[in-house]
Image: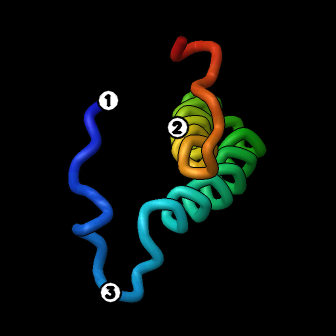
Amino acid sequence: MGRRGSSSDASAGDGGALEAAVYVVETTTNLAFMARRHRLDMLGYLLDMARMEAAEIVRLHQGGAPSPEQR
């Protein structure tokens, strides 16, 4: 998936890409749980995929190695 923009695109005081990715991880975790609780399985799956993408961004920003799927 392509990623648009760069850290220079961030608004002043916005926290940047890392903070946004952390927020997305937290939020999509809760939303996926809610979706599954209400038997919205496909929505839960899609939210989990978004969470995994955001978690990968966080890990890479923190100096982690690429995940096994990306090697």
Is residue 35 positioned above or below 41 on the image? below
Residue at the location (52% across, 44% down)?
57
Q: Which amino acid lies under the numbered mark 3 shown in the image of this protein?
A: Ala
Q: Which amino acid lies under the numbered mark 1 shown in the image of this protein?
A: Met
Expressed as whole percent of the image width and height from the top left, the position of residue 61 reads 55, 50
- The Cα atoms of the two marked residues, 3 and 1, are separated by 26 Å
Residue at the location (74% across, 47% down)?
33
Q: Which amino acid lies under the numbered mark 2 shown in the image of this protein?
A: Glu
Q: Nearer the viewer, mark 3 or mark 1?
A: 3
Reading the image, the residue beneath label 1 is 1
- The Cα atoms of the two marked residues, 1 and 2, are separated by 10 Å
Query: Which quarter of the rendered picture does the N terminus lie within?
Result: top left
Mark seen at residue 47: none
Q: Nearer the viewer, mark 2 or mark 3?
A: 3
Q: Nearer the viewer, residue 38 or 55?
A: 55
Q: Earlier in the sequence, mark 3 or mark 1?
A: 1
Residue at the location (70% across, 36% down)?
39
Reading the image, the residue beneath label 3 is 12
Furthest residue in direction front, as rendered: 63
Task: Assess disc 1: are there few (<14), some (14-19) or many (≥20) residues with their C-alpha within 10 Å of its C-alpha.
Answer: few
Q: Nearer the viewer, residue 15 or 26?
A: 15
Residue at the location (56% across, 29% down)?
42
Asked whether residue 43 is in view, the answer is: no
Residue 63's image quarter? Answer: top right
Q: Secondary structure at mark 3?
A: loop
Task: Assess disc 3: are there few (<14), some (14-19) or many (≥20) residues with their C-alpha within 10 Å of its C-alpha.
Answer: few
Horizontal side of 1 relative to 51 (left or right) equals left
User: Answer yes or no: do the residues labelled 1 and 2 have beta carbons within 8 Å?
Assistant: yes
Expressed as whole percent of the image width and height from the top left, the position of residue 68 reads 64, 14
Reading the image, the residue beneath label 2 is 53
